[in-house]
Image: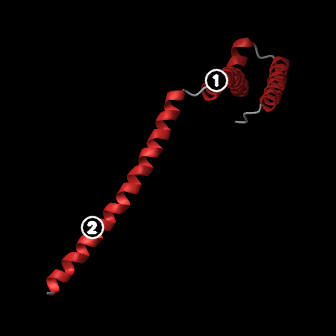
Amino acid sequence: MGSRNKEAQERQKAYFERGLEKRLSFLSKKGIESPAVDKDALVKKMRANIRAINDRLKAIVANERRTEELAKMKAEKKASSAVQKDQAEKKEKSAKAAPPEGKEKKRKKEKETGQEQKKEQKPEKKKVKEKAQEKVPEKEE
């Protein structure tokens, strides 16, 4: 009876309503009046079951509404993010299409100066090696 399926709950509600009608007709044929009918245990139980099912149906409907609202919000968010991505892509394309010239020149200079520094470092190493070789023979003598 704890099913979350709306159709199953509606079938259970119809089942209990039919049972309640049968019980009320039985009690009326028997000659029992309204205040005594309200005290009947089976009538109380069936009415309680119907109330419980009504509460479950309300919860199911509320959950469906919430799901629909979340789906709408998700669709709106997706649409707005798509628009923002398009705008960002346009900005990136325009930025990439016209790079500032100053930065390119600086990069070339840095590369050139870096190559010159490497050329200068190699002869220094040779000088250091030559000095080390000169010192070694002096120690042997």
Type of the residue with mark 1: Ser
x, y percentage for residue 74? 67, 25
Type of the residue with mark 2: Val
Q: Secondary structure at mark 1?
A: helix
* Dot placed on the residue nearer the N-terminal end, 1 or 2: 1
Residue 52 figure quarter: top right
x, y percentage for residue 108? 50, 40
Name the residue rendered at 42%, 48% in the picture.
114
Of the numbered discs in the image, which one, if any, rests on residue 94?
A: 1
Name the residue rendered at 52%, 34% in the picture.
104
Name the residue rendered at 66%, 20% in the picture.
80
Q: Which residue is mark 2?
A: 128
Identify the image quadrant of the C terminus.
bottom left
Question: In front: 15, or 117?
Answer: 117
Residue 119 placement, left or right of 88: left
Identify the image quadrant of the N terminus.
top right
Q: Nearer the viewer, mark 1 or mark 2?
A: 2
Question: In front: 7, or 19?
Answer: 7
Q: Does the residue at mark 1 contact the one at mark 2 (Cβ under 8 Å)?
A: no
Residue 113 placement, left or right of 50: left
Distance from disc 1 to disc 2, alpha carbons, whole Å, reads: 52 Å
Q: Secondary structure at mark 2?
A: helix
